[in-house]
Image (cartoon, rainbow, N blue to C red):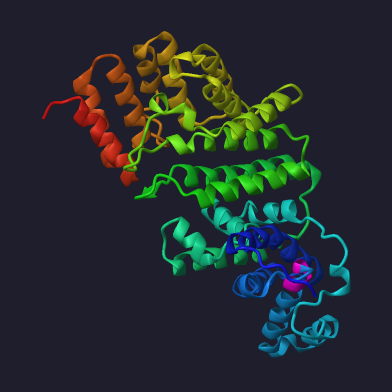
Amino acid sequence: MSRARPPAAGVEDLLRTLAPQVLGALVRRHGQFGLCEDATQEALLAAARRWPAEGVPERPRGWLVTVAERRLIDRYRAEAAGRRREEALAARAPSGDGVAPAADEVAPAQDDTLTLLFLCCHPSLTPASQVALTLRAVGGLTTAEIARAFLVPEATMAQRISRAKQRIRDAGAAFDLPPAAERSERLAVVLHVLYLVFNEGYTSSSGPDVARTDLTAEALRLARAVHRLLPDDGEVAGLVALMLLTDARRPARTRADGSLVPLEEQDRGLWDRAMIAEGVELISATLARSTLGPYQLQAAIAALHDEAPRAEDTDWRQILALYVLLEGAADNPMVTLNHAVALAMVRGPEAGLDLLAGLDDDPRVAGHHRLAAVRAHLREMAGDREGARADYRTAARRTTSLREQRYLEGRAARLGGP
């Protein structure tokens, strides 16, 4: 059997691509999502240890399915009640060193990515649990990797994932696509979870790093997978385009010392033009044929920013019109914050500040650092240095991101005063 020896990064990418295929094959065959997911993770870990040194098997998916099934056999052996099932499994499992695939693994793999995403984003789960389970079961990340990404202890993340699998089991969720009547609503949850993963990676909510590219890359990979399976869905295409157009600006978001650079001050020569071109082409195509949804509107806004050669060339009037549409499509105070900035750029800072005033009593955002930061920015535009300085300091106290905190404190210091 021929074995190639790719670099470790190549093995990691391959394993993440194969993870949903392997888990899907096991769940279709044996049920027991929780046990199959654990067995799949053990097989992925075994491959991560062996393949970089020994080479990738000729049929890597079959190798992983075989190893995972053996882990299932081991688990059933440990349970007296599972003896009869263990014997049935053992009769089907191939012998040898775990690299020879079962007969049905030679056939082209069924892509279970979408089915698994629906299962991991089951409505019985909290958003945090949906994110964690998605990254583990569909993304193929280990519990330790997910815990590091979200800056929590591994034991805490393990408990979160375990509880999520238990809730899915208690809910009696089947390994199948949801009924057609529920599919649109459930797909919206899947897209929201991928968007949460991307945003957490692009602008870390806590800790010293402004971004974690492992999360943005994984969110984009999974969004592309959904787009491949649902190529005619406008919101799926919109989400992929939004991720591309946003992540294209990442190289210019920080200076050499790690400090943040606001959009209007970024060196646009550092932006990834290939990602921008792909994102613009994708959103242009979907806008022409689909009913507008929130992700498409956000992608259209991002495209206008990315296509402007200079900050002063930005078409703020068109962006403002898109934010008006977006607010009508999504009841989200964060949209109103961005709408206020666009309004200020077109009609002046006082108009933007008037719009922000309506958020002071909104519990979803009233104590959020971004409300204080946007108000500070608009007050600075209006020449209210003292008010802007106070708001920048309030925003700095509220954020848990160390780099955002340093940026906001720097903006306040730049305005002088005590």
Give above or below for 183 relative to 154. above
Between residues 343 and 417, which one lies in front from this camera angle? 417
Q: Can the viewer see residue 118 in this picture? A: yes
Q: Is residue 329 above or below residue 127?
A: above
Residue found at the far top of this picture: 347
Whether residue 366 is visible: no
The image position of residue 232, as x and y in percent, is 78, 34
Locate residue 89, reporting x and y percent: 80, 82
Q: Which residues are magenta?
A: 60-64
329 in magenta: no
Image-based side of 47 in relation to 409, left or right: right
> Which of the two residues, 69 or 100, is positioned nearer the viewer here?
100
Q: Position of residue 164 (x, y in %)?
A: 58, 62
Which quadrant does the C terminus fall into?
top left
Q: Could you tell me what secondary structure mostly forms the magenta stretch?
A: helix
> x, y percentage for residue 53?
62, 74
Closer to us: 90 or 220: 220
Q: Is residue 309 above or below residue 269?
A: above
Which quarter of the figure has residue 168?
A: bottom right
